Structure formats: C-alpha cells, structure tokens
Image: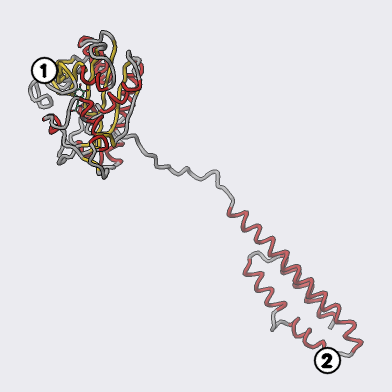
Amino acid sequence: MLKKIKKIKGEALKKISSANTLTELEDLRVFYLGKKSEFNDILKGLKDLSTEEKRKVGPSANETKKGIQEALENRLMELEEAEDAKKEWIDITAPGKKIKKGHLSPLSIVQNNIEDIFTSMGFEIADGPDIDSEFYNFDAMNMPADHPARDMQDTFWVKTGSRKEEERAVLRTHTSTVQVRYMEKNKPPFRIIVPGRVFRSEATDPSHEHTFHQFEALVVGKDVSVANFLYIAESFFTQFFRRKVNVRLRPSYFPFVEPGFEFDINCANCGGKGCGVCKNTGWIEIGGAGMVNQKVFEAAGYDRGKYQGFAWGFGMERLAMIKYKISDIRLFHSGDVRFTRQFK
Ligand code: DAH
C-alpha cells in the first residue's frame, strides 16, 4: 500500500507541474483527490487496517494528500500569473489605430482670424452676456420702448417674472449691447472688438438663422473720425481676404450712430465688373457702421460732446460664407463633420 501511495504521489506531482491550462489542472485535481479517485479509495480503506499498519500508512497518506494539494495550489498560481501577463502584453509591432479628431468649425476659424488681425492692430477683445437687459440691448442704444427701430430686430424676450422695465431681459439681438457695458467700466481712448452670439426670432432660410454671430467694433477717443473707420476697415478686410479690399459707404440709419452707414466691399469674384455673387453691382454688402451717437455716450455716463467714436457690426457667418463660398447659413448648425472638415 505504501508503494501505491508513493507511486500516486510521484505521478501526480509530475503531471501537476507540467499541466499547462487551468482545465488540465482541475482534471488532475479530480483524478487524484476526487471522491472517485484511487487515492480516495486508499484513504477510505485505512479504517480496515490493523493498528500497526495504520501507524505506518496513515501519516504517509496524509502527507501525500497535503503534498498534492500544495502542488495544485502552486501550479494554479503560476498559471494564473502567466494568464495575467498575457493580458498585459503589448504588441509594439501592431499598426496604430487612427484616432478620430474633431475639426474647428469654419466660424471658429473666422473668429480666430478676426481676433488675430485686430489684436495685432492694438484692439482689445471684450464680451458680454447672451441674456442681457432691455436696457443694454435697446434703451442704452438710443432705442426707448416706443422707438420704431425696435421692430427691426425680432426679439426673443426672456420670462423674468417681473414687469419692471429695468428687470426685463432679452436674448441679445446684437453685440452692440457690449458698447455701453464696456464704456461704463472704461474711459477712452480705447478700441475693442466684440465677437459673440446673437438671437433673432426669425424664420430660418438659407440666409437667416435664429441664432448667429456678430462682431462689433468700437473705437472711441478725442478725435476719431470716419476716415479712421475707413482705414481700419480696409486694413482688416484686406488682411482677412488676403487681397486688396476697398470699402464703400452708403448712408443709412441706426439709432445708435449719427451719421450712420451701411458698408460694402468690392466683389472679389468679378473684380467689380458685376456677377451673380454681387448681384451685378460689383459690391458685396457687409454690415452697419457709423459715428457713435452722443446719446449712447450719455447712457454710458460720458459727458456729451467730450468724445467721438465709430462703431460697426456685422454677421460673422456672413463673412465666413463669403470667404468660403458657403451657400446656406443653416449648415453652421448642422453639426455635420463632413461640412466642418472642408475648411482650413
Ligand atoms: N447692431 C446692428 C444690427 O445688429 C448692426 C450695427 C449697425 C452695429 C451699425 C453698429 C453700427 O455698431 O454702428 O443690426
């Protein structure tokens, strides 16, 4: 019997140490220690032995059982470690996976471009809140409650639960709101631009969106003139479109400027001869501008007549559409990367 036990032990230890998988190991455990195993029969038979035999065989059987169990545990640990190591293995020869990156929208590209050009000309970038008071959007801009010009801008009113005029709020209809906000806190001379989001309660079509972006410029000092405006505007558009751009002024009306203009740039597509892009006029309409109305300075707390300044405002999407020949303003909100990827 002792021989049998010794044989089982020798065989088991050898097989265990060369088991290569967890299932193989489990099979060995069942085969050598399981209820139906030869070794278990031996253990069960111990009780029938004489006391003397028991004394000889008993300890040896127990020791064998322990030995096999230990060998199983050790091998189990080794196999599990090997398994883990396999998982952490990095194949440094595997080809790289292409990481999908986002892309700047043409609008962000245009805005960055505008900011670079103006900061290089000594302008500061200012901003204000998207939800603003009726005061900054209208009253301070010389558009009191009964002013007909308020109808020019279809306004989203924001429920504030208050009927008091100073607590009424709007989604700003233009970036002009930042003019008085900025002037309340700063004294001339200064030059700022204000790129920002604006809102109009309008039906959308290829050239109208309810949410779009404007970009305001405001230059104030002791003797700022229309000639300064023309010079800055032509330098800006020349850098922006990377060609010599001429600016043309047409008289127009905005309550916050006096005199007021609309301004155009010469058409790059036909060089001024007239084509589909400029509707045969040779000029492309860009935005509004003018000399700051003294009433706006007064709203900001400046003394009447002390300063002069010019302001302008226009749509950034429109500028991007001209630069990149984009035909529909609604594409900007489409969130479609096939659209955004096209622009550099
Ligand atoms: N705020 C005007 C608009 O949204 C655009 C504008 C016109 C801004 C003339 C100006 C300006 O600063 O001088 O329609």
- What is the three-letter code of the residue carrying label 1? Pro
Q: Residue at the spot x=20%, y=36% of the render?
A: 329
Q: Position of residue 334 (x, y in %)?
A: 25, 42
Name the residue nearer the viewer: 199 or 78: 199
Q: Residue at the spot x=87%, y=85% of the render?
A: 54
Relative to 150, is 74 on the left or the right? right
Q: Alpha-carbon neighbours of circle 1 within 10 Å: few (<14), some, or many (≥20)?
A: few
Relative to 344, is 67 on the left or the right? right
Q: Position of residue 125 (x, y in %)?
A: 34, 23
- What is the three-letter code of the residue carrying label 2? Asp
Of the 4 image quadrants, the one containing the N terminus is bottom right
The answer to whether residue 26 is above or below residue 88 is below
Report which quarter residue 47 is drawn in.
Answer: bottom right
Pointer 2: what residue? 48
Q: CA distance from mark 2 to mark 1?
A: 122 Å
Q: Alpha-carbon neighbours of circle 2 within 10 Å: few (<14), some, or many (≥20)?
A: few
The answer to whether residue 166 is above or below residue 266 is below
Label 1 C-beta lies within 8 Å of the nearest ligand 1 atom: no
Pointer 1: what residue? 251
Q: Residue at the spot x=11%, y=20% of the render?
A: 252
Name the residue nearer the viewer: 13 or 102: 102
